[in-house]
Image: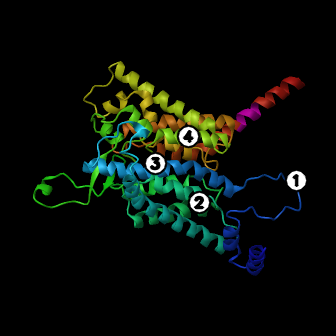
């Protein structure tokens, strides 16, 4: 009772002041606000934006924890301290806690910088404009560390987060008004501003020793770059990982994108909670399969030779594209963003299909940047309102025709 009374007193103290949004944001983080509507028709729901965002974060946590284990495992694999894990999820070498701590100590600063900078900007704009704090960045703050290289400098990440939140969201009016996915906009900013860090073909392995001629001379390096599967294929090299490794996630890659199994589990959780659109996920998968199948047929018909720089990715078994890079992660967690995705049922099918189709298209024809799902989603974010417009207009025309037929 004393705590409740103290909170009530603080609420009255800050009521009507510039700091009211800041207090209310913390006050309602775990508890639903007790304000009720006094006019108009309303439906009371058990959830709100904050609860919805927290549900998505829960779906992301397994990918984050697995990514920490995998970052440490890839480090020890490069240094020769462990061999390739045998037994998948039952491998003791992978689930060794030393793997987790190596990844944890490298990744948790990315999470902290993402949230401190991003939420700080949200608080500043809420206080400045006198509106309630919008919790849309709760998910973005978790997505960002999962889609950037583990070795990205913290200052670089901070600059990108500022750009993404201010230019990508606040200038449009805040959460619910942005036309581009903020997390992908942050990644796009990093890609175009600092391309050497975001090439998409290498992943840094912390603490390893670079095997070069300089080593023989007694000098050492701080890190070694390990090829990702997409990076190897883009350079026409053979892939050293099995399909099982790619599905479970025992491969180099950005923190959250490697384990297709856990991403699939997160997808089912989002669909069951009715937060993620299964239509977009399924149609994106179909689009990638169709594009990959078409490329396989181009190779089968002999229309492209092995000497072509596009051959390796074109010849990749079409359904393997679902396991490579960040496609699964993007299709589940970012293409389904309810703000930037299509809103109509038919539009979601078109929107998702084109994301999958274009992702594989970019992946094959742009060897310098084999990870195409980011650009595909951002492109379709721009066209989502247009897709919905023509879907709605098509429905209107069909209804007008039926009306005219009945009145004729």
Residue 66: mark? 3
Sequence-wise, the earlier of marks 4 and 2 is 2
Point out the stretch of residues depicted in magenta: 392-397
Task: Name the residue tied to disc 2.
Answer: 137
How dense is the environment of label 1, judged by Cα within 10 Å: few (below 14), some, or many (20 and up)?
few
N-terminal of the pair, mark 1 or mark 3, is: 1
- Residue that sits furthest to the front in the current view: 92
Q: Is residue 394 magenta?
A: yes
Q: What is the number of the mark on residue 21?
A: none
**Quadrant, the N terminus:** bottom right
Closer to the chain start, of discs 2 and 1, is 1
Q: From the top left corner, tell me how far across and down residue 260 is, in percent.
A: 47, 39
Q: Is residue 249 visible?
A: yes
x, y percentage for residue 310? 32, 33
Q: Are marks 4 and 3 in contact (CB under 8 Å)?
A: no
Q: Earlier in the sequence, mark 4 or mark 3?
A: 3
Where residue 41 is drawn, which disc sits there?
A: 1
The furthest residue to the left: 217
Label 2, label 1: how many angstroms apart (C-alpha)? 29 Å
Q: Residues within 10 Å of mark 3 (few under 14, many from 20)?
A: many
Work out whether 326 lies above or below 204: above
Left or right of 391 on screen, residue 104: left
What residue is shown at x 35% (from left), y 23% (from top)? 299
**CB-based contact (under 8 Å), mark 1 and mark 3:** no
To which residue does mark 4 refer? 265
Q: In terms of secondary structure, where does tag 2 sit? A: helix
**Secondary structure type for disc 4:** helix
Q: Residues within 10 Å of mark 4 (few under 14, many from 20)?
A: some
Look at the picture and state if 223 lies above or below 123: above
């Amino acid at each position: 009772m004393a705590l409740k009374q103290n909170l009530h007193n603080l609420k009255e103290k800050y009521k009507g002041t510039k700091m009211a949004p800041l207090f209310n944001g913390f006050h309602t983080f775990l508890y639903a606000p007790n304000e009720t509507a006094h006019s108009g028709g309303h439906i009371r729901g058990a959830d709100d934006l904050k609860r919805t965002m927290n549900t998505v974060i829960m779906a992301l946590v397994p990918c984050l924890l697995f990514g920490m284990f995998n970052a440490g495992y890839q480090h020890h694999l490069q240094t020769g301290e462990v061999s390739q894990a045998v037994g998948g999820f039952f491998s003791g070498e992978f689930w060794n806690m030393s793997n987790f701590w190596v990844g944890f100590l490298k990744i948790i600063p990315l999470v902290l910088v993402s949230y401190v900078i991003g939420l700080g900007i949200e608080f500043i704009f809420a206080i400045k404009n006198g509106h309630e704090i919008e919790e849309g960045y709760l998910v973005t703050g978790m997505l960002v560390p999962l889609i950037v290289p583990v070795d990205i400098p913290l200052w670089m990440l901070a600059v990108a987060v500022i750009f993404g939140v201010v230019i990508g969201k606040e200038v449009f009016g805040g959460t619910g008004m942005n036309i581009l996915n903020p997390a992908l906009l942050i990644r796009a900013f990093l890609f175009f501003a600092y391309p050497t860090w975001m090439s998409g073909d290498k992943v840094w392995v912390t603490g390893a020793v670079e095997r070069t001629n300089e080593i023989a001379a007694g000098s050492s390096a701080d890190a070694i770059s390990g090829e990702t599967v997409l990076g190897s294929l883009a350079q026409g090299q053979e892939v050293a990982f099995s399909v099982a490794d790619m599905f479970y996630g025992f491969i180099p890659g950005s923190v959250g994108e490697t384990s297709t199994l856990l991403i699939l589990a997160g997808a089912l959780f989002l669909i069951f909670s009715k937060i993620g659109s299964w239509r977009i996920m399924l149609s994106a998968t179909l689009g990638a399969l169709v594009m990959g199948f078409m490329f396989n047929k181009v190779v089968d018909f002999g229309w492209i030779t092995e000497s072509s720089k596009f051959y390796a990715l074109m010849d990749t078994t079409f359904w393997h594209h679902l396991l490579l890079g960040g496609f699964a992660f993007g299709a589940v967690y970012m293409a389904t963003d309810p703000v930037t995705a299509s809103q109509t049922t038919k539009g979601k099918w078109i929107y998702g299909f084109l994301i999958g189709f274009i992702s594989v298209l970019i992946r094959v024809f742009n060897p310098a940047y084999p990870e195409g799902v980011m650009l595909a989603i951002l492109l379709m974010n721009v066209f989502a309102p247009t897709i919905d417009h023509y879907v709605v207009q098509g429905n209107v025309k069909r209804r007008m025709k039926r009306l005219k037929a009945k009145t004729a």
